[in-house]
């Protein structure tokens, strides 16, 4: 089946897989968003225990999706994997250790003889929630704004900044830094919006839910501000295009806007995604009692569609998905950064297991959310996080 496809078709197919996994990952970051709300929603030890255990039921799903995304990127676009993960070293290491903090915190927060105390691990969870969302958003933004790297004729990449990725976040003399940060903050506040809706779906505690509604509207407004700033910038900046015949990279005015115009299906997916996100927010806030439990499915599905369409815009239609601001011709495309046809063909059969990953997420979610977490359950559960 897959062996009959052309190499270019396989490259487009695999980028769609990467985009789908990336969009699911952004949705699953509601766990990280919820971790930044532990002390905002929980004013007593018992309330914080409820919040932590509601998130503890799902934290491994985010980690599973992140690992699957990384493995798929490594297999299908190894030059991108080597350039980004090996080049933007400090950003990825911070993300890695932030997720280690998360795993350790859920494991040891309530263990006997915990000499660090609950609060230390709750701080670790906050760090994971803040850095995990912000930095992942910044790194995704570079698909549009570019990074400082070069690639030799032997496909050996070199990161040309001594700060090894930190310049993407801290170089305030470059306007692109503000675009990067805007998406990072948009992802951060979106994760808190999704977390608020998740608590509506999984927690039965009046005092917590009363605070959730307030956090939903505050974080929704902040998310929309930063997301609109990001979108308005990328639609009107010059993007990184390449000629399909010889691969020459050049700057094209309004490239990403042109991509949406020239790929109307992707534009429709983006519009539907944004509308669905807003529908979920409206249902969650204005119809809290009637539709609050289901609002996360609207906003979650809308998040997946929106991120999926943006990642397609970043790579399809002869676009460099990982541009180089140091050397234009070193920019990576789905054509020059992919694995061989043999590898992509073989891995395409493996990709047929992606629906099983999605099914696992759905099954685990359904099994763990059959009953909402209550005060009584946490008071009598000696094995809680």
Image (cartoon, rainbow, N blue to C red):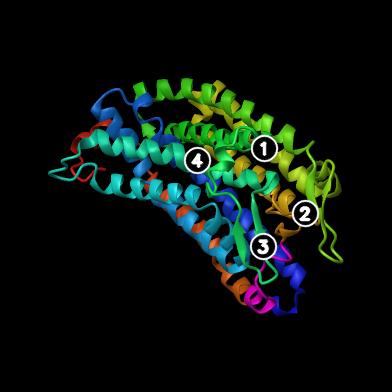
The residue tagged 3 is 151
Element carrying mark 2: loop
For label 4, the SS is helix
Q: How far apart are marks 1 and 3 (CA)?
A: 21 Å
Marks 4 and 1 sit apart, C-alpha to C-alpha, by 19 Å
**Quadrant assignment for the C terminus:** top left
Magenta segment includes 22:
no
The region drawn magenta spans 334-345
Are the two marked residues, 2 and 1, in contact with CB atoms closer than 8 angstroms? Answer: no
Q: Position of residue 306 (x, y in %)?
A: 66, 42
What residue is drawn where x is 39% and y is 38%? 127
Residue 273 vs residue 30: left or right? Answer: right
User: Where in the figure is residue 136, as x and y percent of width and height?
Assistant: 53, 45
Which residue carries the number 4 mark? 133
Q: Are marks 1 and 3 in contact (CB under 8 Å)?
A: no
- Residue hosting label 2: 319
Q: Is residue 347 toward the left or the right of residue 334 in the image?
A: left
Q: Which of marks 1 and 3 is in front?
A: 3
Dividing the picture into quadrants, the one containing residue 182 is top right
Label 1 sits on residue? 176
Which mark sits nearer the N-terminus, 1 or 3? Answer: 3
Q: Quadrant of residue 79?
A: bottom right
Residue at mark 4 to residue at mark 3: CA–CA distance = 29 Å
| C-alpha distance separating marks 4 and 2 | 26 Å
- Tell me the mark number nearer the camera, choosing from 4 and 1: 1
In the picture provided, is 115 more to the left or to the right than 151?
left
Alpha-carbon span between mark 2 and mark 1: 18 Å
Badge 4 or badge 1: first in the primary sequence: 4
- The location of residue 263, given as percent across then percent down, is 82, 50
- Which residue is more in the foreground, 80 or 147? 147
């Amino acid at each position: 089946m897959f062996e009959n496809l052309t190499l270019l078709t396989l490259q487009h197919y695999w980028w769609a897989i990467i985009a789908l996994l990336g969009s699911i990952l952004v949705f699953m970051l509601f766990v990280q968003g919820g971790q930044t709300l532990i002390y905002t929603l929980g004013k007593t030890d018992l309330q914080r225990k409820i919040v932590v255990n509601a998130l503890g039921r799902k934290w491994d799903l985010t980690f599973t999706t992140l690992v699957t995304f990384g493995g798929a990127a490594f297999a299908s676009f190894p030059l991108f994997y080597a350039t980004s993960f090996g080049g933007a070293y400090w950003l990825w290491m911070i993300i890695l250790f932030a997720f280690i903090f998360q795993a350790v915190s859920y494991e040891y927060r309530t263990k006997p003889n915990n000499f660090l105390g609950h609060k230390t691990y709750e701080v670790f969870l906050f760090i994971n929630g803040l850095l995990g969302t912000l930095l992942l958003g910044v790194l995704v933004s570079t698909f549009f704004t570019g990074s400082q790297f070069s690639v030799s004729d032997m496909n050996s990449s070199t990161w040309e900044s001594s700060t090894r990725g930190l310049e993407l976040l801290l170089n305030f003399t470059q306007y692109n830094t503000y675009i990067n940060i805007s998406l990072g903050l948009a992802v951060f506040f979106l994760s808190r919006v999704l977390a608020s809706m998740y608590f509506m779906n999984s927690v039965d505690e009046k005092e917590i839910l009363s605070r959730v509604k307030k956090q939903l509207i505050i974080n929704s407004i902040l998310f929309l501000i930063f997301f609109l700033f990001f979108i308005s910038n990328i639609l009107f900046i010059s993007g990184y295009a390449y000629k399909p015949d010889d691969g020459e990279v050049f700057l094209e005015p309004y490239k990403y806007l042109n991509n949406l115009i020239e790929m109307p299906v992707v534009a429709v997916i983006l519009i539907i995604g944004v509308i669905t996100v807003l529908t979920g927010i409206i249902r969650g806030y204005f119809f809290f009692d009637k539709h609050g439990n289901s609002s996360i499915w609207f906003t979650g599905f809308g998040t997946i569609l929106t991120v999926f369409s943006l990642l397609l815009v970043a790579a399809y239609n002869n676009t460099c998905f990982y541009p180089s601001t140091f050397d234009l011709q070193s920019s990576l495309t789905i054509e020059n950064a992919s694995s061989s046809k043999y590898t992509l063909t073989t891995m395409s059969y493996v990709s047929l297991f992606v629906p099983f990953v999605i099914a696992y997420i759905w099954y685990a979610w359904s099994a763990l959310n059959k009953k909402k977490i209550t005060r009584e359950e946490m008071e009598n559960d000696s094995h809680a996080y």
